[in-house]
Amino acid sequence: MNAVDCPELRDLLLFIGGDLADADIPHHTKLGELITERYKVEYAKMLTEIQNSLGRVSFMSDMWTNQDSKSFMAVTAHYWSHSGKNIAQHFLKIVEEIGALQ
């Protein structure tokens, strides 16, 4: 996020931004606040969607430890149709997005 404070990036944004003023470009502290605010909104939406999908939610978890012996756990909630066709479509979409089919 510190990149938004780079003078060259700000100059470039002002150059291509038309009516954009320097005051319109947030600095890294404001950008962090905006991201945090948006995260909270999207997280609340996700919780509501999951709570309204009870009985149709599948959970998956994975745990690992990095080279510094720091432990991590990821929990994923799936609440879309689990038909073979639907799973295949979502899987292929993800594989295409990350460029793994090249």
Image (spheres, helix red, strand yellow):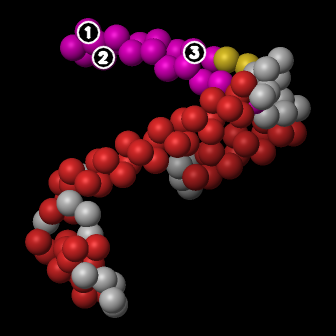
Q: Are marks 3 and 1 in contact (CB under 8 Å)?
A: no
Cα separation between marks 1 and 2: 5 Å
Question: Looking at the picture, which amino acid does disc 3 mark?
Answer: Ser
Give the quadrant of residue 53. top right
Which is nearer the N-term, disc 2 or disc 3?
Answer: 3
Give the quadrant of residue 11. bottom left
How many numbered circles are shown? 3
Q: Position of residue 8 (x, y in %)?
A: 14, 74
Q: Are marks 1 and 2 in contact (CB under 8 Å)?
A: yes
Question: Looking at the picture, which amino acid does disc 1 mark?
Answer: Ser
The residue segment tinted magenta is 60-79
Query: What residue is disc 2 on?
Result: 66
Give the quadrant of residue 102. bottom right
Query: What residue is disc 1 on?
Result: 69
User: Is residue 11 on the magenta stretch?
Assistant: no
Query: Image height check: is 64 above or below 5?
Result: above
Query: Image height check: is 3 above or below 87?
Result: below
Residue at image coords 34%, 11%? 71
Residue at image coords 28%, 73%? 24
Query: Image height check: is 23 above or below 71?
Result: below
User: Is residue 66 on the magenta stretch?
Assistant: yes
